[in-house]
Image (cartoon, rainbow, N blue to C red):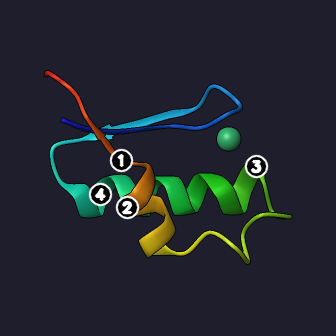
Amino acid sequence: MNQVMCECGFAARATQEDQVVTDVLAHVRADHPDLAGDVTPDVVRGWIEVVPD
Ligand SMILES: [Zn+2]
């Protein structure tokens, strides 16, 4: 599983890296619009941790 934990407690998990990126970008736009301009797909990929299923 690929996982990204947001500092607010939100967690996105998926087997597909692209799905995690999509989920995190949607979360940032919805809950952290002030950060949306800085958080690109490459930035999100840097946050991904690989965790056991
Ligand atoms: Zn968040």
Q: Measure the alpha-carbon separation of dots 2 and 4.
A: 11 Å
User: Image quarter for residue 30?
Assistant: bottom right
Q: Residue at x 51, y 53 (%)?
A: 24
**Residue 31: which disc?**
3
Q: Residue at x 41, y 58 (%)?
A: 46
Task: Report the residue marked by disc 1.
Answer: 48
Q: Helix, strand or loop at disc 1?
A: loop
Q: Residues within 10 Å of mark 3 (few under 14, many from 20)?
A: few
Rendering coords of residue 6 (x, y %): 59, 37
Relative to 8, is 3 on the left or the right?
left
Q: Residue furthest right?
A: 34
Say which residue label 2 marks: 45
Discs 2, 1 touching: Cβ within 8 Å: yes
Q: Nearer the viewer, mark 2 or mark 3?
A: 2
- Local crowd at mark 1 within 10 Å, few (<14), some, or many (≥20)? some
User: Alpha-carbon neighbours of circle 2 within 10 Å: few (<14), some, or many (≥20)?
Assistant: some
Q: What residue type is labelled 1?
A: Ile
Q: Which mark lies nearer to you, 3 or 1?
A: 1
Looking at the rendered structure, the kind of residue marked 4 is: Gln
For the image, the number of numbered tags is 4
Residue 51 place in picture, x, y as percent: 22, 27
User: For the residue with label 4, is its CB less than 8 Å from the closest atom of ligand 1?
Assistant: no
Residue drawn 47% across the image and 60% down it = 44
Is the CB of the residue bearing disc 3 within 8 angstroms of ligand 1? yes
Which residue is the site of mark 4? 19
Tag 3: amino acid: Asp
